[in-house]
Amino acid sequence: IFRDNRIPLLLAVWTIGTYMFKIFNFYGYILVSSPVKRCGKSLLLDLLSQVCFNATSRLVNPSEAYVFREVDGNDATLIIDEVESLGEEDKEKKANLISLLNSGFQRGSQVPRMEARGKVFEPVYFSAYSPKVFAGIREIVDTIEDRSFRITMVRKLKTETVERFILRKQEHQIESLREDLFIWGLGNAEDIAEVYENCDGFSGIESLDDRKKDILEPLLSIASVIDAQSGETLETYTQLVNLALDIAGARIEREEIEGAIPAMVGIAKNVLDGEEEKFVSSEEIFRRIQEEETLRFISSKKALSSFLSKFDLHPIPTPRRQGGKSVRGYLVRQKWVDEIEERYV
């Protein structure tokens, strides 16, 4: 289940691109996230592992050596689950893996390693460039997100039904689909490469930063050829552009919120002033927020309510007497402050 019905289109075009990624200078990653477990991330990764070019199975905490050898030897599409756990027990391993993944979205990127040749160690260079899919619950380093299309999964409602994926029953259909993708890629890669190389700038994405343009342009090249063949005037192209702009806007909003959390925690601590819980009026907390530069994007009490609700802090339903009058506001608890600080700060 996707909140945005354009996400399957993005995934479909991205999957097509895994069959011809070498014609592009860059090929962005897919980053699948969710606020909690059981939102379908693993199922989505299993589906992608079945249809992408030379895809691995769903991997958890693969070694650095496996990653660069699989990419170099097989041009593999890497499918990595629980990406936040990469190298968690070994800081040096984690740093090396992150460095590899940071460079692996760009054609020509290599990983140098010393390998034994008899009694002599010689430098060997492994290609790091390949399509990659990551999934996780916790945040990962910004540099990987910069190279990715972020897809946020949600739990399906009881009223939402989907067809169950059973590999043994659909294996033949999937194999046929992979063959079709391979043949389509062979037949259209030259046209797509021509669009990619000869376009001075794709329309509609001028507001994106250069990194986002780098990873979006291959998909827009594929979309342009799809639209030309289907006769749908810029249908696929336009949907991908609009989705990319929305994803970029969502990240800006998320970064703005994340940057505001420490200031919000500071205000809550000042409100409590050592007490376990304390009522604060909407007027008072809004006044305090307007004094903090990082929180000035909260421009009204309605915006304040929306912002605090993201962290499960809501106005109490019954007004309280304060200063001789009835006022609405929030009951701030130390337990809530501790939890927000532990999770986000």
Image (cartoon, rainbow, N blue to C red):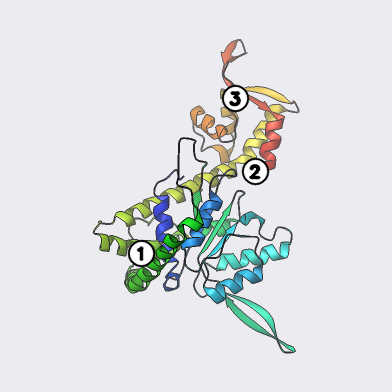
* Residue 183 horizontal/vertical position (percent): 37, 71
Classify residue 278 by image quadrant: top right
Q: Foreground mark, 2 or 3?
A: 2
Q: What amino acid type should be assigned to the residue bearing mark 1?
A: Ile
Dot 1 falls on a residue whose secondary structure is helix
Of 135 and 193, which appears nearest the observer? 135
Of 116 and 323, which appears nearest the observer? 116
* Residue 173 horizontal/vertical position (percent): 42, 60
Residue ID for mark 2: 344
Q: Is residue 341 above or below residue 125?
A: above
Q: CB under 8 Å between callouts 2 and 3?
A: no
Residue ID for mark 1: 222
Q: What amino acid type should be assigned to the residue bearing mark 3?
A: Glu
Classify residue 70 by image quadrant: bottom right
Can residue 301 be seen? yes
Q: Is residue 110 above or below residue 283?
A: below
